[in-house]
Image (cartoon, rainbow, N blue to C red):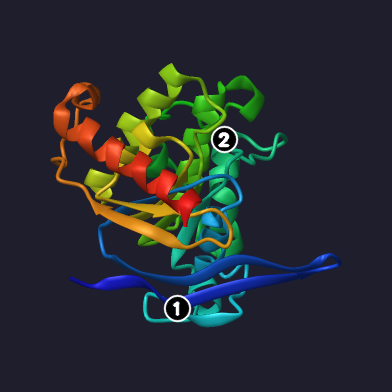
């Protein structure tokens, strides 16, 4: 199985006026092509920091990290990944289509190709027909779907998602979890997903990475036995509850180390 993201003994220490802050320590992890990997841990444990290292937005102070066989900076320049932030981050003066089109414009795609890709990604996230709407005319959940479409538009193999549904209510979140899982199955992309929600991590993932309080370390990696096709009511089944219990125990254990 092809490894697309590989971290070996990864450390990251920030230098501050109050002294060094050890954000990540000794992180070892391989993410394979087509994986859906969720990162879960307490606030400040380094989940987002690790995602930003993969994206080349933060630079480790120790160890090694490769993305598609390249350094994170090389992968960023090669546009090897799409990034979905906690907030949708759509430009209010651009239509939904215009927001999705923006990275394609920057990358120099032809107008015809931009039009094709915008239509295709809107269809993927079930927003066909909303191309000419503005962000303020859409619900929060629809804005996040548009943000996902923007990250998918240039067809990168890797999708990095930093708690994209955290601010949404539970009903909308459940719906978007279902849609994201279906999109992952259709596209076969490799997804690295940050969350604070145990049910979300268990429902979405092929693997769940449990992290400790700072300095962020991996305390457990759980391979999910759940089938690729997962209705929401699978959360009531014993296998789901058992995985959630193991995640919870891993989180508790991180505090005790």
The answer to whether residue 103 is left or right of residue 6 is: right
Q: Position of residue 129 (x, y in %)?
A: 44, 26
The quarter of the rendered structure image containing the N terminus is: bottom left
Mark nearest the camera among 2 and 1 is 1
Residue 212 relative to residue 137: left or right: left
The mark found on residue 151 in the picture is none
Q: Is residue 253 above or below residue 28?
A: above
Q: Position of residue 148 (x, y in %)?
A: 47, 43
74 relative to 29 in the view: left or right: right
Residue 94 appears in which quarter of the rendering? top right
Q: Position of residue 118 (x, y in %)?
A: 45, 44
Res. 18 visible in picture = yes
Residue at (43% x, 29% y) in the render: 127
Q: Label for residue 9?
A: 1
**Closer to us: 124 or 105:** 124
The image quadrant that residue 247 belongs to is: top left
Q: Secondary structure at mark 2?
A: helix
Of residues 57 and 202, the one drawn nearer to the viewer in this rendering: 202
Q: Earlier in the sequence, mark 2 or mark 1?
A: 1
Identify the residue shown where x is 21% and y is 36%: 242
At a point 49% along the width and 82% down the height, the residue shown is 63
Which numbered dot is residue 96?
2
Tag 1: Cα neighbours inside 10 Å, few (<14), some, or many (≥20)?
A: some
């Amino acid at each position: 199985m092809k490894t697309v993201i590989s971290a070996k003994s990864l450390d990251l220490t920030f230098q501050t006026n109050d002294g060094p802050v050890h954000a990540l320590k000794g992180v070892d992890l391989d993410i394979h092509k087509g994986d859906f990997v969720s990162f879960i841990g307490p606030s400040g444990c380094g989940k987002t920091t690790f995602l930003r290292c993969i994206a080349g937005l933060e630079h480790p102070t120790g160890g090694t990290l490769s993305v598609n066989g390249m350094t994170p900076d090389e992968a960023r320049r090669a546009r090897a990944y799409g990034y979905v932030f906690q907030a949708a981050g759509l430009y209010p003066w651009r239509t939904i289509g215009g927001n999705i089109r923006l990275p394609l414009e920057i990358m120099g795609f032809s107008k015809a190709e931009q039009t094709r890709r915008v239509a295709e990604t809107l269809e993927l996230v079930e927003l066909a027909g909303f191309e000419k709407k503005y962000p303020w005319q859409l619900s929060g959940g629809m804005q996040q779907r548009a943000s996902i479409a923007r990250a998918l538009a240039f067809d990168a193999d890797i999708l990095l998602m930093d708690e994209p549904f955290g601010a949404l209510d539970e009903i909308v979140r459940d719906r978007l979890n279902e849609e994201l899982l279906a999109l992952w199955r259709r596209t076969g992309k490799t997804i690295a997903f940050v969350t604070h929600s145990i049910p979300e991590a268990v429902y979405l993932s092929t693997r769940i990475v449990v992290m400790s309080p700072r300095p962020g370390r991996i305390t457990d990696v759980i391979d999910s036995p759940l089938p690729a096709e997962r209705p929401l009511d699978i959360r009531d089944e014993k296998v789901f509850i058992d995985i959630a219990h193991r995640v919870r125990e891993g989180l508790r254990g991180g505090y005790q180390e």
